[in-house]
Image (cartoon, helix red, strand yellow):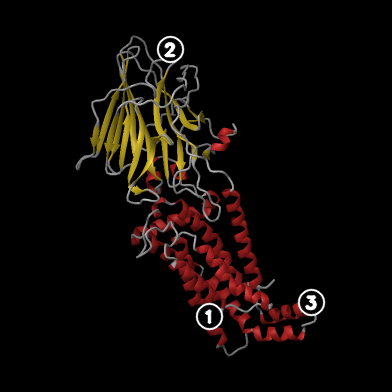
Amino acid sequence: MDTRRFILFVVLSFGILYGWSYLQHSQQPQRPAVVQQSGANPTAAATPSVAAAAPADTSRLQKGSRVRITTDLIDAEIDTMGGDLRRLSLLKHGRHEQPGTPLVLLDERPDHTYVAQTGLLQASLPNLPTHRTLFTTKDSQVRLENGQDSVSVRLEAAEVGGLKVAKIYTFKRNSYLIDVKYEIQNGGAAPVALSAYYRLLRDGSLPEGSGNGFFGTATFTGPAVYTDISKFQKVDFKDIDKGKAEYAHEGRDGWVAMIQHYFASAWLLSANGYQNVCARNACRFEVKSAGDGLYSAGAVVDLPAIQPGTTSSFSVPLFAGPQETRRLLAAAPGLEFVKDYGWTSVLARPIFTLLDMIHGLVGNWGWAIVLLTLLIKVVLLWPTAASYRSMARLKKLAPRMKRLQEQYADDRMKFQQAMMEMYKTEKVSPLGGCLPILVQIPVFIALYSVLLATVEMRQAPWVLWIKDLSLPDPYYVLPVIMTVSSYVQTFLNPPATDPMQDKMMKLMPLIFGVMFFFFPAGLVLYWVVNNLFSIVQQWLITRAIEKGDSPA
């Protein structure tokens, strides 16, 4: 098999593989958005010390009054019914179709439900505050002013069995971590052991802008659970519906989350800088259908006994924001895995780390891609140079190849034997030119995954007309340059022995170029820079060999 046929095989196999994957996923029905429905049964498994029973799910999300909180990064609303976080907008991230309008992550609408809820459980105290308890507060609107590092909202519930309970939300500057603290005063005569549940409730509809990638790489929307032992486990909505959801049901650390394209919310049970609430007794995780098209992802925490006449407090932070790698790493162990690169993670994560380092130097993701491409080319300079020398020698041997083809026109077998003997004599490998394409393909796929999953590049501009590297070039300038440069490269390569095959290879840049019209601009930028560098390198090597005094 000569070089050109091998490259054609690789390209066509590559296209068929991902085209089939894309077709298969595109035929799967998208989950429709569902109307606001009842809250789900909170995660509550009974323990020997606390027979925790959750309130039944018999009604829709109820409403009280709203408290609005505005910081430098978020605009949030807490409902006094349950003290739920019912709405959260990200002020630094725009909507998919309207970049100037803040993206809404948590929300409660007739066609969409996605809220964060908490509550307390104890079998002998059925009226403890849950997500159906009406809290009171003196606040109606809170704003983080200049000079302030944090603001808080205090919600208080009616006294139950001598227990006074307050839920306190604290929002911090330059942070997507929201501290949620319970403050419990035991005015009774006996110790009280309680459990607390933390859950995220949402429907199964896909968020805007989370469609399929061209390669059939669909972004994941749904629950996820992490523990140090079981690691990161995604739970598909359809597996929940079938009763086949697989995840860690308990652990002494970790988090439970709802993730979607670019963004996530997660209750962090062992957050950095916080006490591990699972250290005393293992926390219990539960991911399930809540009925009426809603899904619940939550955890139950057993609390230390509160002695009579004492006040106890404990905090569990909620992360709600973009999947920015540095923030995820700083928030909790393992939280960086919500930025899911899928099966390309082994290569995609190092590529993003390198890109992030370069971005820290140049301050622009587009130029970071350019420099990353050049760095990869420099690292592979020697092996690719060897490949281009092999291709140049093959090109120089083209006249001899043509004579052999004419000499053995009626005997294909003898032609193949004579051709292989010539390769052996001239010490030329017919597959020597395949290395560049073989090296580019895994990097290309991994970089595609990085661009698909990296919120840092979402709505990130490069130059002039490129306003978002994660979207296709709006004027198709980069795809055209890529196609033309690929066509130029065909003239630097040795001609195929079969004229029809040679014509086909001349058409490949056009066929392959059409695909790039739908790729993210950042990915096309990588390929364009790679092509231009390769053209210069290959031309210099070919020119040197063609002008050499000795035969090829």
**Along the polypeptide, which appears first: circle 3 or circle 1?**
3
Q: Which residue is mark 2?
A: 124
Check disc 1 and give the amino acid type: Ile
Q: Give yes or no for contact between labels 3 and 1 (Cβ–Cβ under 8 Å).
A: no
Residue type, label 3: Met
Say what amino acid the circle numbered 2 marks: Ser
Q: How far from the left and from the top, in percent, is residue 221? A: 49, 42
Q: Quadrant of the N terminus?
A: bottom right
- Mark pair 2, 3: CA separation: 89 Å
Residue at screen point 29% across, 33% down: 170
**First-in-chain label (2 vs 3):** 2
User: Quadrant location of residue 125?
Assistant: top left
In which quadrant is the C terminus drawn?
bottom right
Q: Residue at 60% x, 77% y: name it.
A: 391
Q: Which residue is mark 3?
A: 413
What's the residue at 54%, 71% (across, down)? 384
- Is residue 134 or residue 282 the one in the foreground? 134
Q: Residues within 10 Å of mark 3 (few under 14, many from 20)?
A: few
Is residue 365 something one can see in this rendering?
Answer: yes
Q: Where is 198 relative to 322, above or below?
A: above
**Residue 429 shows in the view:** no
Q: CA distance from mark 2 to mark 1?
A: 83 Å
